[in-house]
Image (cartoon, grey):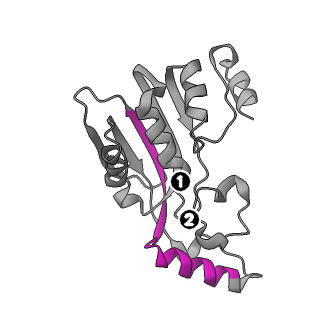
Amino acid sequence: FTRFNAALNGMAERCKYVHGDICDAALLPKLKSQGPFNVVLANPPFLPNPAGTNTAAGAMYSTGGADGERVYKALVIAAAQGLLSHGGRLCVVSVTPNAEDLAKRVEAWLLREQLSLDGVLFRGSSTPIEKILKHPDRPLEQTCYTRACKALGLHSMSPTLLMAGAAENHSANVACMGVHPGLF
């Protein structure tokens, strides 16, 4: 789908494609050998899947880990570890748990690893976690999922767009631009 989309937009000759799991430490050297990149675009799997309770969403959406941020965090860390060229940008489109605190979480991920990126975060309206999976034919799964998410402190999901780049002063600053209803 990525190659098709690039071709459809006249970008096929300007793109590099790598298939792999960004959470696999062995992938980063492979990516670095093909980079640095001017732009890294990502739409990672995002649905929380605590204790495997989310069986209805499928692998495309529910492989983001227990809290839904396993892949998102790996993308941010990899970008800060040298995937981006000077002036390069990381753009992540996702539906994110507890998005009102995402900017602080991204900063904490970077600081914990002693890495730096600066960015801006846009977020859309929140949807309560109870309304994320609606399967009337699976009430037990719905109840287990909601309880497991709440046990992790997850209370809502919101569409988000993170745009980040190398920090000039070796900092980790992500500004949240507030709520933008209808973001996507």
Query: Magenta part of the protein: which range?
Result: 141-164
* Residue depicted at 53% across the width and 24% down the height: 32
* Residue depicted at 35% across the width and 59% down the height: 101
Residue 122 horizontal side relative to residue 104, left or right: right
The amino acid type, in three-letter code, at marker 1 is Arg
Image coordinates for residue 136, horizontal then vertical, percent: 73, 81
* Residue depicted at 51% across the width and 48% down the height: 72
Residue matched to label 2: 66
Image coordinates for residue 181, horizontal then vertical, percent: 44, 55
Helix, strand or loop at label 1? It is: helix
Q: Nearer the viewer, residue 75 or 115?
A: 115
* Residue 146 is covered by the magenta coloring: yes
> As drawn, which residue projects farthest toward the front?
26
* Residue depicted at 70% across the width and 32% down the height: 2
Say few, some or many: other residues with alpha carbon within 10 Å of mark 2 (under 14 / 14 to 19 / 20 or more). many
* Residue 177 is covered by the magenta coloring: no
Residues marked 1 and 2 touching at CB (< 8 Å): yes
Residue matched to label 1: 70
